[in-house]
């Protein structure tokens, strides 16, 4: 079980880099601030000959949506894609700052005797519950993206279906 919102894995394919790039380009579109249509590719970001940085396009709030970075390595008979997924650095910094402020206040009030022990236990446990919810949100999205990205690179998801709302990737 992984605790931190970070994952790295490798995808191997016998296809040349040009085919892998075609598959990714067919299902990744440029990043947009606002989307008013539900007809779009499943991912947004940038792709180059050396690698990519993408994230899944969602229509709900999830600050812990993984940022996916990949690096291509071409070998004689296959293409190797090294992938890293992690939460956005701003989200991690904000979460760390929030936990630091929360616990510094709770510990100070508890040591000063301004808070009863049973209330201190409740107030101490609340951020842990929030952390578990954030952890679940990240890993749910990370596992989904890992499976979809593997299928895209291996050619198991057809680019023709990218705008088909009846089929979920």
Image (cartoon, rainbow, N blue to C red):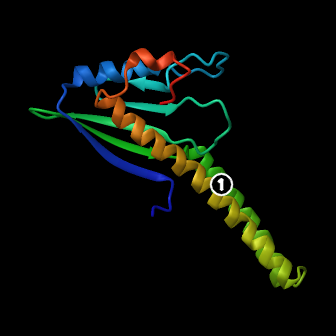
Q: Which residue is outermost to the right?
A: 114
Is 91 displayed left or right of 7 in the figure? right
**Which residue is drawn at the image coordinates 22% and 25% (left, top)?**
17
Number of numbered discs visible in the structure rendering:
1
Is 10 displayed left or right of 94 in the figure? left
Q: Is residue 147 above or below residue 29?
A: below
Q: Quadrant of residue 11?
A: top left
**Which residue is drawn at the image coordinates 57% and 16% (left, top)?**
39
Depth check: give the residue in front, 155 or 60: 155
Q: Which residue is outermost to the left?
A: 76
Quick check: can you spot residue 52? yes
**Which residue is drawn at the image coordinates 23% and 20% (left, top)?**
18
Q: Around disc 1, counting alpha carbons within 10 Å, would you say few (fewer than 14), some (14 to 19), or many (20 or more)?
A: some
Depth check: give the residue in front, 2 or 69: 2
Per the image, label 1 sits on a secondary structure element best described as helix
Residue 168: x and y, percent?
51, 29
Residue at label 1?
Answer: 95
The N terminus, quarter of image: bottom left
Q: Quadrant of residue 19?
A: top left
Is 111 displayed left or right of 62 in the figure? right
Residue 62: x and y, percent?
64, 41
Residue 119: x and y, percent?
85, 77
**Which residue is drawn at the image coordinates 80% and 69% (left, top)?**
105
Is 165 displayed left or right of 156 in the figure? right
Quick check: can you spot residue 51? no
Residue 92: x and y, percent?
59, 51
């Amino acid at each position: 079980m992984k605790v931190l919102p970070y994952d790295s894995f490798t995808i191997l394919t016998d296809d040349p880099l040009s085919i892998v790039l075609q598959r990714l380009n067919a299902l990744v579109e440029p990043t947009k601030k606002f989307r008013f249509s539900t007809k779009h590719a499943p991912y947004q970001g940038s792709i180059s000959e050396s690698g990519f940085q993408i994230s899944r396009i969602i229509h709900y709030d999830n600050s812990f949506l993984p940022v996916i970075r990949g690096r291509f390595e071409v070998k004689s008979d296959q293409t190797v894609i090294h992938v890293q997924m992690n939460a956005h650095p701003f989200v991690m910094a904000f979460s760390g700052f929030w936990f630091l402020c929360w616990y510094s206040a709770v510990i100070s009030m508890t040591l000063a005797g301004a808070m009863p022990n049973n209330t201190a236990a409740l107030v101490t446990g609340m951020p842990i519950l929030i952390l578990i919810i954030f952890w679940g949100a990240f890993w749910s999205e990370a596992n989904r993206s890992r499976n979809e990205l593997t299928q895209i690179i291996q050619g198991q998801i057809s680019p023709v279906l990218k705008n088909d709302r009846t089929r979920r990737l």
